[in-house]
Image (cartoon, rainbow, N blue to C red):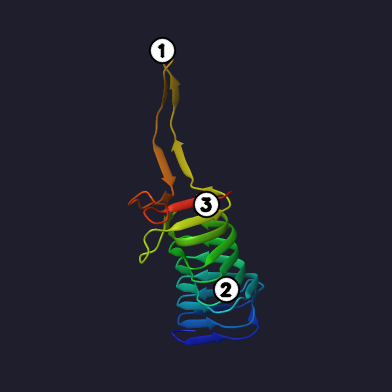
Amino acid sequence: LADGLLTISGHGGLCKRTLNTAGTATWTAGNIILAEGSVLNNLGTFDVRVDGGLSGAGTFSNMGELLKSVGSGVTAFSVTFNNAGLVDARGGTLGFTSYTQTAGEIRLNGGAVSCPLLDIQGGMVTGSGTISGGVINRGQVTPGLAAEPIGILEVRGNYVQPATADAGGPYAVDEGGGRELAGSVSESAGGLKIEIGGLLAGTDFDQLNVVG
């Protein structure tokens, strides 16, 4: 569907098919099933205006913008979900059973996010609100938004920001008992950016609260 309009207003789905949306898709009612390896690739705007469910043995890949603009309840993505674009939770809760982000951004912008584990391999986590589930951060977590730079993110699960070091080469012990490990060391880690402008939490400086 190239540069067009798509409205999903009832129950439907795909079976062994791939759908590419490059225009604006609006989901207003019903549930969606991605069956038997079906793939939905969003390259444009996918506007969620329903508290419904997208489920099945398929994959939703977002390379554009996925936003939940309407609804105070949960919209559940019970499929493999890959993000390299923008996921914008503006209301209610975006729920995921599987979430992997390699680039782009997941933004809490008035809404919440739930997932057993947000696997942030790249890109950013921004905004203010609650993430119900664990987070592994290899990208960057930045509480707050451009319009409201001071923010509070709460993670109701485990928060892991990994770092690795790999040293290779020969290992030797000299006569005095000293040890030498030749080679190189490489490190990789996620980032946490906190803005500090005063002493009052949530007003003068950002917070990342982890309730694991």
Q: Is residue 52 visible?
A: yes
Q: Secondary structure at mark 3?
A: strand
In the rendered view, tell whether residue 106 sits above or below residue 139: below
Furthest residue in direction top, as rendered: 175
The x and y percentages for residue 49 are 55, 79
Badge 1 local density, few (<14 within 10 Å), some, or many (20+)?
A: few
Q: Are marks 2 and 3 in contact (CB under 8 Å)?
A: no
Disc 2: which residue: 72
Q: Amino acid at mark 1?
A: Gly
Badge 2 local density, few (<14 within 10 Å), some, or many (20+)?
A: some
Q: CA distance from mark 3 to mark 1?
A: 43 Å
The x and y percentages for residue 192 are 42, 50
* Front residue of 143 and 141: 143
Disc 3: which residue: 136
Q: Is residue 138 visible?
A: no
- At 45% from the left and 73% from the top, the residue drawn is 64
* Front residue of 132 and 176: 132
Nearer the camera: disc 2 or disc 1: 2
Disc 1: which residue: 176
Does label 2 or label 1 sit earlier along the sequence?
2
Is residue 10 rendered to the left or right of residue 63?
A: right
Q: Amino acid at mark 2?
A: Ser
